[in-house]
Image (cartoon, helix red, strand yellow):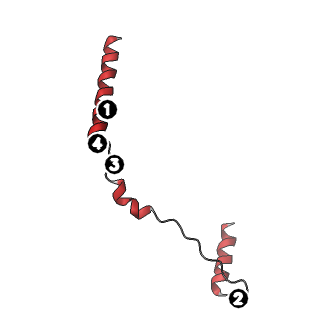
């Protein structure tokens, strides 16, 4: 049991030393975060009084997805 406690203590010491020196710092994600920050923008509602080809395509897309 004594060897197990010493080994666990050694791993705990090494873990805290590596955290303190920045071993686990993420240097890659911040550089690519700007590529994925944009949220999807929904289309603005169209005028209900006019019908265009775009309105027809939206209706077709909605019926296919259901």
Earlier-in-chain disc, 1 versus 4: 1
Spatial CA distance of label 3 from label 1 is 16 Å
Spatial CA distance of label 2 from label 4 is 60 Å
Q: What element carries label 3?
A: loop
Where is residue 9, by image quadrant?
Answer: top left
Q: Which residue lies furthest to the left in this view?
A: 21
Spatial CA distance of label 1 from label 4 is 10 Å
Position of 41 relative to 57 (above/below): above
User: Which residue is rendered at x = 51% and y = 65% of the image?
Assistant: 39
For label 1, the crowd category at 10 Å Cα-Cα, with few meaning under 14, some 14 to 19 and many 20 or more, is few
Spatial CA distance of label 4 from label 3 is 9 Å
Spatial CA distance of label 2 from label 3 is 52 Å
Q: Nearer the viewer, mark 4 or mark 3?
A: 4
Residue 47: % across, % down: 68, 84
Residue under numbered circle 2: 50
User: Which residue is rendered at x = 40% and y = 59% of the image?
Assistant: 33
Where is residue 37, by image quadrant?
Answer: bottom left
Residue 25: % across, % down: 32, 45
For label 2, the crowd category at 10 Å Cα-Cα, with few meaning under 14, some 14 to 19 and many 20 or more, is few
| The one of 60 and 22 positioned closer to us in this rendering | 22
Residue under numbered circle 1: 16
Q: What element carries label 2?
A: loop
Number of the label disc, if any, that sits on residue 26: 3
Residue under numbered circle 4: 22
Residue 34: % across, % down: 40, 63
Earlier-in-chain disc, 3 versus 1: 1
Q: What element carries label 1?
A: helix
Q: Quadrant of the C terminus?
A: bottom right
Q: Which of marks 2 and 1 is in front?
A: 1
């Amino acid at each position: 049991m004594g060897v197990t406690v010493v080994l666990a203590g050694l791993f705990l010491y090494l873990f805290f030393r590596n955290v303190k020196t920045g071993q686990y710092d993420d240097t890659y994600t911040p550089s690519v975060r700007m590529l994925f920050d944009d949220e999807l923008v929904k289309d603005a509602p169209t005028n209900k009084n006019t019908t265009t080809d775009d309105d027809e395509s939206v209706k077709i897309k909605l019926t296919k997805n259901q």
